Amino acid sequence: MKSIYADYAASTPTDPRVVEVMEPYMTDFFGNPSSIHSFGREADVAVGEATEIISRFLGCKKEEVFYTSCGTESNNLAVIGVAKANKDKGRHIITTAIEHPSIMNACKALEKDGWEVTYLPVTKEGLVEVESLEKVLKKETVLVSIHLANSEVGVIQNIAKLARISNKHGALFHTDACQAAAYLNLNVKTLGVDLLTLNGSKMYGPKGIAVLYVREGVNIFPIFYGGSQQKSLRSGTENVPGIVGLAKACEIASDNQEKESQRIGQLRNQLEKELSKIPGLSVNCAGAVRLPNHLSVTFNESKESNLVEVLDNKGIAVSSGSACSSKSIVDSHVLQRIGLSGDQIHKTIRFSLGRQTTSEQVKKIAQVARVI
Ligand SMILES: *Cc1c(COP(=O)(O)O)cnc(C)c1O
């Protein structure tokens, strides 16, 4: 029996249309875009065309798109690069207590180097309150980094408002949009952000490619030093097949966003309704605006100690607290912050649906979950 995949928030399959456009850039047009000869020029043209598509997806200029190797790298570049370039203005950064580890740990590293970091609390529904941000902004604040949608509970933050208030106080605003790309509009003007992280592997694109949008005029230092590619902000030979593939993934995402959000949202609601019949089950952050494909539930009355393993053995692939830390025994910081106890955290499962999820699969998931 083939397992049902319900862990799209951890990784999406690469769309076959994406694979198709990438292939020639590994075999025929393999040149280094920095090379002067025809092979190099072909690669350079491909990167330019892809950047055109990606900048349209983000509503920004081509010159504001920078390529990195993953979401983690983009997030590190945003936090550390902005902090170092603006340290004369101040050494204060604001983020939230429920960020991805790539933001959290970059901030921790800066703290060791003398920066002050404020970790904003969230409500029980996983929301950052605008007032709590306003209270901690000060003239030394150089950067506010708040994710667009949470990877564990799917809660969507009010980025436009949070960004506006940060800018009003003279701080730059970064958002980690890795979870949101397949479902939400990422127009940087509408969001009002100065920097934004986007990741291929969570939006049916290839792994190993990500973007950092950096608004023109933002002061930022590199974290890698090398051959001065990408205006020296991110040295290293560009991942041409990855960039071409990511552009295709963006194109597909913008063509399908509305339809997909609706279809998958209905499936999620169907699953939520079915699972809610289980005695003692609670839906996390049910009152918040969430991504249409996310469902985090706690099986409060389950006697099992490892629900992910139990479900896997029954042919359903899901995550516990956090995709990135589910192999370690550390409790999810996100679930702690929304008020779950240690026991509840161990009984919490994230179902995340996606492009290949069907109504039959949802029925099967509900059937299996009922008896665990
Ligand atoms: C997956 C993810 C990342 C990290 O991306 P990688 O490509 O795995 O480095 C960062 N932030 C969020 C919200 C994510 O979901």
Image (tube, rainbow, N blue to C red):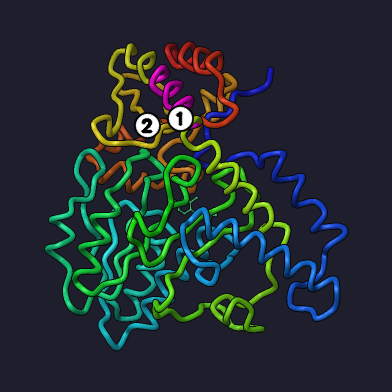
Figure check: 163 above or below 10: below
Disc 1 residue lies near ligand 1 with CB under 8 A: no
Task: Report the residue marked by disc 2.
Answer: 296
For label 2, count other residues whose C-alpha is less than 10 Å away and answer few (under 14), some (14-19) or many (20+).
Answer: many
Mark 1–mark 2 distance (CA, rounded to whole Å): 6 Å
Mark 1 vs 2: CB contact within 8 A:
yes
Magenta part mainly helix, strand or loop? helix
Q: Residue 30 at x, y = what percent?
A: 82, 64
On screen, residue 18 above or below 272: below
Q: Position of residue 277 (x, y in %)?
A: 33, 11
Point out the image quarter for the C terminus: top left
Q: In terms of sequence position, does the residue under pointer 1 or pointer 2 come before the other? A: 2
Q: Amino acid at mark 1?
A: Phe
Camera-side residue: 269 or 45? 45
First to last magenta residue range = 260-271
Q: Quadrant of the N terminus?
A: top right
Q: Which residue is mark 1?
A: 351
Q: Is 263 included in the stretch rendered in magenta? A: yes
Q: Is residue 79 magenta?
A: no
Provide the secondary structure element on which disc 1 rests. strand
